[in-house]
Image (tube, rainbow, N blue to C red):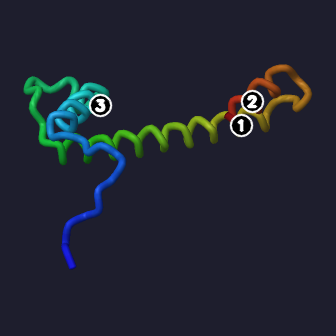
Amino acid sequence: MSNRRPASSTPRITDEQIIELVSKLQQLLPELRNRRSNKASASKVLQETCNYVRSLHKEVDDLSDRLSQLLSTIDNDSPQASIIRSLINQ
């Protein structure tokens, strides 16, 4: 029995493509984008990506909570309440 993986119909991603994707990802991350050095390890970029996504998720949760609190203070039939409900449900 061979230890080789079966051939896949999906083309393999090349090292150059990985480097390019990591570089593009690095440019999206505020923590890494503003550094003097453009070089960061792939693991650092992925770690910062996870941290950034977590912070964005927390920010969305906080904003949703604030909208919910605001909604509880206004008339449910008002146009503002309708806008807030649509924002919360997105």
The spot of residue 55 in percent (x, y) is 41, 41
Q: Amino acid at mark 2?
A: Ser
- Most extreme residue toward the top, as rendered? 79
Q: On the rendered structure, is 88 left or right of 47?
A: right
Give the image location of residue 48, x and y in percent.
27, 42
Instruction: Give the residue displayed 41% in from the left and 45% down from the top.
Output: 54
Question: Which residue lies under the disc numbered 3?
Answer: 29
Q: Given contact means CB atoms under 8 Å apart, are the residues at marks 1 and 2 in contact?
A: yes
Residue 86 numbered mark, or none: 2
Q: Residues within 10 Å of mark 2 (few under 14, many from 20)?
A: few
How dense is the environment of label 3, judged by Cα within 10 Å: few (below 14), some, or many (20 and up)? Answer: some
> How many numbered marks appear?
3
The residue nearer to you, when weighing 59 against 89, is 89
Q: Is residue 28 left or right of residue 42?
A: right
The residue labelled by disc 1 is 89
Quadrant containing the N terminus in the rendered view: bottom left
Which residue is painted at 71% across and 39% down in the image? 68
Residue 88 image position (x, y, % from top left): 69, 35
Earlier residue among tags 1 and 3: 3
Question: Mark 3 or mark 2: which comes first in sequence?
Answer: 3
User: Label 1 sits on what residue type?
Assistant: Asn
Vertical relation: 69 (above or below) 83: below
Q: Amino acid at mark 3?
A: Leu
